[in-house]
């Protein structure tokens, strides 16, 4: 039987180009079911994968997922360990979905990961580097202030070495030194899980983003929920420039 085509929730010219999502609420989702937090992450990872494929089918070009912050290392060892193993598992899975032609970009500092995981991430970025259907940004060991500070350091070194003049530093040049270099700004930032804050995610890139918050815990945030957020985004931006 032919696969059912998924319809985009809004016309193509009203779709957000870049959607970012904070995958919050895995722990609470598991607790509600009397299960360990790590079970929530396993479920969250499944949701991540379904959402990514849904976004691709409806024509989203860039989607960034907040998977692990620079602060998340402070969580109990077993939880950190479980998350690292999920990353390994999903990197491997990505190779089974090459026909989807999704380019994967790691947003974050890889150096703090175990060497094998660093290599897996680097290889996946390389091996999907030419894919053109969609770009998935996976924020792992990510912190926005660290990203911005590191960009400032790199630019300062270029000035110090005489390769750049202070007046050459424009917003565009600065953006090229962020992990998201080459990606457009975020149009729609989604946070399920009931909290209404940015938690150090893509501060620079969200300068003009629309924000969408909802109480659904991330493991339950399915394609329909994503469509709802996109419809709300289109409703808001339709008024762009108008009264
Ligand atoms: C925050 O919810 C969630 C995380 C810190 C981890 C997110 C990771 C995944 C969804 C799975 C792995 C991702 C990939 C890309 C394979 P929380 O657990 O802090 O929720 P809580 O507020 O209910 O405790």
Image (cartoon, rainbow, N blue to C red):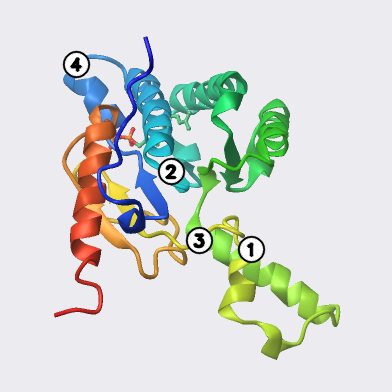
Badge 2 vs badge 1, beta-carbon distance below 8 Å:
no
Secondary structure at badge 1 equals helix
The residue that label 1 is drawn on is 150
Q: CA distance from mark 3 to mark 4?
A: 39 Å
Q: Nearer the viewer, mark 2 or mark 4?
A: 2
Q: Earlier in the sequence, mark 2 or mark 3?
A: 2
Does any atom of ligand 1 lie closer than 8 Å to the CB of label 2?
A: yes
Pick the front one: 46 or 54: 54
Verify CB contact (< 8 Å) between mark 2 and mark 3.
Answer: no
Q: Are marks 2 and 4 in contact (CB under 8 Å)?
A: no
Going from N to C along the chain, the mark reached first, 3 or 4, is 4
Crowding around mark 2 (Cα neighbors within 10 Å: few <14, some 14 to 19, many 20+) is many
User: What's the CA distance linking mark 2 and mark 1?
Assistant: 19 Å
Question: Mark 4 falls on what kind of element?
Answer: loop
Task: Name the residue that disc number 4 marks.
Answer: 33
Asked if residue 19 lies left or right of residue 234, the reply is right
Pinpoint residue 213: horizontal percent, then vertical percent: 21, 50
Q: Which residue is mark 3?
A: 184
> Which secondary structure, mark 3?
loop
**Mark 1 or 3 closer to N-term?**
1
**Mark 3 neighbour density, 10 Å: few (under 14) some (14–19) many (20 or more):** some
Which numbered mark, 2 or 3, is in the foreground of this view? 3
Taking depth in this image into account, of 209 and 199 the one nearest to the observer is: 209
Mark closest to the chain's N terminus, 4 or 1: 4
Residue at the spot of label 2: 66
């Amino acid at each position: 039987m032919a696969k059912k085509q998924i319809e985009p929730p809004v016309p193509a010219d009203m779709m957000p180009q870049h959607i970012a999502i904070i995958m919050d609420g895995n722990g609470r989702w598991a607790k509600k079911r009397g299960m360990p937090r790590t079970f929530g992450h396993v479920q969250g990872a499944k949701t991540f994968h379904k959402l990514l494929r849904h976004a691709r089918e409806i024509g989203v070009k860039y989607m960034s997922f907040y998977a692990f912050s620079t602060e998340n290392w402070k969580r109990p060892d077993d939880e950190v360990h479980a998350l690292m193993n999920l990353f390994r598992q999903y990197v491997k899975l990505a190779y089974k979905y090459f026909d989807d032609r999704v380019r994967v970009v790691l947003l974050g500092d890889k150096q703090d990961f175990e060497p094998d995981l660093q290599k897996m991430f680097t290889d996946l970025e390389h091996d999907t580097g030419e894919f053109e259907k969609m770009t998935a940004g996976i924020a792992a060991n990510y912190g926005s202030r660290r990203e911005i500070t590191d960009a400032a350091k790199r630019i300062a070194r270029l000035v110090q070495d005489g390769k750049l003049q202070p007046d050459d530093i424009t917003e565009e040049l600065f953006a090229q030194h962020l992990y998201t270099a080459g990606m457009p700004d975020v149009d729609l930032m989604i946070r399920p899980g009931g909290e209404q804050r940015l938690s150090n995610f893509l501060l620079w890139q969200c300068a003009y983003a629309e924000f969408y918050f909802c109480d659904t815990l991330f493991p339950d945030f399915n394609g329909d929920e994503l469509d709802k957020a996109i419809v709300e985004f289109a409703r808001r931006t339709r008024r762009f420039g108008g009264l």
